[in-house]
Image (cartoon, grey):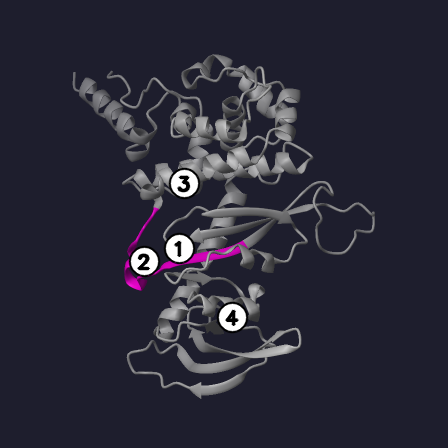
């Protein structure tokens, strides 16, 4: 029988780790001095250990350490110098600056931008659409301030809020910023880069008329939903042309009053009422894009669902319910390494011509993490060896 064509001299995990270029790691170590006074467990070993945690879905320090010690003979091909004990990994998660891993993530995102970017939407709009939102990850201890009432037993859980910005043509975060869960979402608005070639899309939880005024002053577009209790003055109801989608029920120019201390100013915006036949719901959108077609504004807001899909993807496919440390730094490191793992798998997925669901790819990599098969060849044609074996058996049966 012929040899398996998918056999490879590097494990699946080694092939995934090889996507992290040594130069990027060296830049991170040099900038943050993360290996200063460290004798054994260097930043590279730390990164590999935490990526193993993400890919293998480990839920404890003991599980990570024990699994890697058991696979010590298979770690040489990606040059891991020191496999950590449980206490070593716990100390590193507490002491090594989490921003090292954030730096690595953003460098990798810049390197693989061409693989994951899809410019079709930008070609239609002629502007970059960016979506932002936040998701809260509950913690097992009162590490970071959470929201809600105090439980009857008096023991509150903590929570970390992950503020995220993504480009509409990419499926990974462009910017990530951490705060306590109790922090108001509005604080993210001050972090945004105002650009006339950008349209921001966000939900009505970010409604802030001062921020909307800033968007208008910098000629930066935005699309959101109007609050139910919003107070405004109708200025002009615009005619809806025949070529506009029939779901557009109203297109109105409205005026808001912006209060700044004792001063008040008028802010002119546009309100679009749209009926979605699929969900049988009516939506009211708020924007400063006065020249854009009303149905296109509604379509842009619909793209906001992509960031919800991203949050769901991260929480369902990676161990973000179990953290390997009871301190803020360890939690941030684990989230950054989860984002790196998500990025590496996205790069693999985007290069394939065969369609794979992201969850199936994660499961496959977990099962075959230390098997020596060529990842890309197998994913492109997983049945090749099986079909060849069947053909050989049929030929032998003829004799």
- At horizontal 52% and vertical 34% (from top left) the residue drawn is 101
The answer to the question of whether label 1 and label 2 lie on touching residues, with beta carbons closer than 8 A, is: yes
Q: Quadrant of residue 299?
A: bottom left
As helix, strand or loop, the secondary structure at mark 3 comes to helix
Which dot, 3 or 4, sits closer to the camera? 4
Examine the structure image and report whether residue 131 is included in the region drawn in magenta: yes
- At horizontal 54% and vertical 19% (from top left) the residue drawn is 68
**Which image quadrant: the C terminus?**
top left
The answer to the question of whether label 4 and label 1 lie on touching residues, with beta carbons closer than 8 A, is: no
As helix, strand or loop, the secondary structure at mark 2 comes to helix
Q: Quadrant of residue 361?
A: top left
Q: Quadrant of residue 265?
A: bottom right
Give the labeled residue for mark 3. Answer: 109
As helix, strand or loop, the secondary structure at mark 1 comes to loop
Q: Earlier in the sequence, mark 1 or mark 3?
A: 3
Give the labeled residue for mark 1. Answer: 168
Q: Note whether 184 is above or below 328 in the view shown.
A: below
As helix, strand or loop, the secondary structure at mark 4 comes to helix
Crowding at dot 2, Cα within 10 Å, few <14 / some 14-19 / many 20+, comes out as some
Residue toward you, 299 or 399: 299
- Disc number at residue 122? 2
Tell me residue 273's x, y (percent): 45, 78
Q: Earlier in the sequence, mark 3 or mark 4?
A: 3
Give the distance between the C-alpha atoms of the residues marked 1 and 2, in whole angstroms.
Answer: 9 Å
- Disc number at residue 213? 4
**Which image quadrant: the N terminus?**
top left
């Amino acid at each position: 029988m012929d040899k398996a064509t998918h056999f490879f001299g590097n494990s699946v995990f080694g092939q995934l780790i090889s996507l992290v270029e040594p130069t990027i790691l060296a830049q991170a170590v040099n900038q943050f001095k993360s290996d200063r006074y460290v004798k054994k467990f260097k930043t590279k070993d730390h990164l590999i250990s935490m990526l193993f945690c993400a890919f293998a879905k480990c839920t404890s320090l003991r599980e990570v350490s024990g699994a890697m010690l058991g696979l010590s003979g298979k770690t040489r091909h990606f040059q891991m110098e020191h496999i950590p004990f449980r206490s070593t990994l716990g100390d590193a998660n507490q002491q090594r600056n989490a921003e090292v891993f954030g730096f690595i993530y953003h460098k990798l995102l810049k390197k693989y931008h061409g693989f994951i970017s899809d410019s079709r939407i930008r070609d239609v709009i002629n502007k970059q659409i960016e979506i932002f939102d936040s998701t809260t990850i509950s913690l097992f201890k009162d590490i970071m301030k959470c929201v809600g009432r105090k439980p009857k037993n008096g023991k509150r859980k903590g929570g970390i809020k992950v503020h995220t910005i993504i480009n509409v043509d990419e499926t990974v975060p462009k910017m990530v910023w951490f705060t306590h869960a109790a922090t108001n979402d509005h604080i993210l608005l001050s972090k945004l880069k105002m650009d006339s070639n950008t349209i921001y899309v966000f939900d009505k939880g970010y409604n802030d008329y001062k921020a909307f005024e800033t968007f208008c002053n910098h000629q930066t577009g935005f699309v959101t939903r109007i609050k139910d209790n919003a107070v405004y003055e109708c200025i002009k109801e615009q005619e809806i042309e025949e070529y506009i989608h029939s779901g557009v029920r109203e297109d109105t120019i409205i005026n808001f009053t912006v209060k700044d201390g004792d001063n008040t100013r008028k802010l002119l915006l546009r309100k679009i009422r749209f009926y979605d036949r699929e969900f049988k719901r009516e939506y009211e959108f708020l924007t400063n894009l006065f020249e854009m077609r009303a149905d296109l504004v509604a379509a842009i807001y619909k793209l906001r669902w992509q960031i919800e899909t991203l949050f769901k993807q991260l929480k369902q496919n990676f161990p973000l319910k179990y953290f390997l440390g009871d301190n803020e730094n360890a939690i941030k490191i684990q989230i950054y390494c989860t984002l790196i793992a998500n990025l590496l798998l996205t790069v693999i997925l985007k290069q394939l011509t065969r369609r794979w669901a992201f969850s199936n790819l994660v499961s496959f990599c977990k099962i075959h993490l230390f098997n020596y098969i060529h990842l890309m060849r197998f994913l492109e044609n997983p049945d090749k060896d099986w079909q060849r074996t069947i053909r050989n058996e049929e030929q032998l049966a003829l004799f």
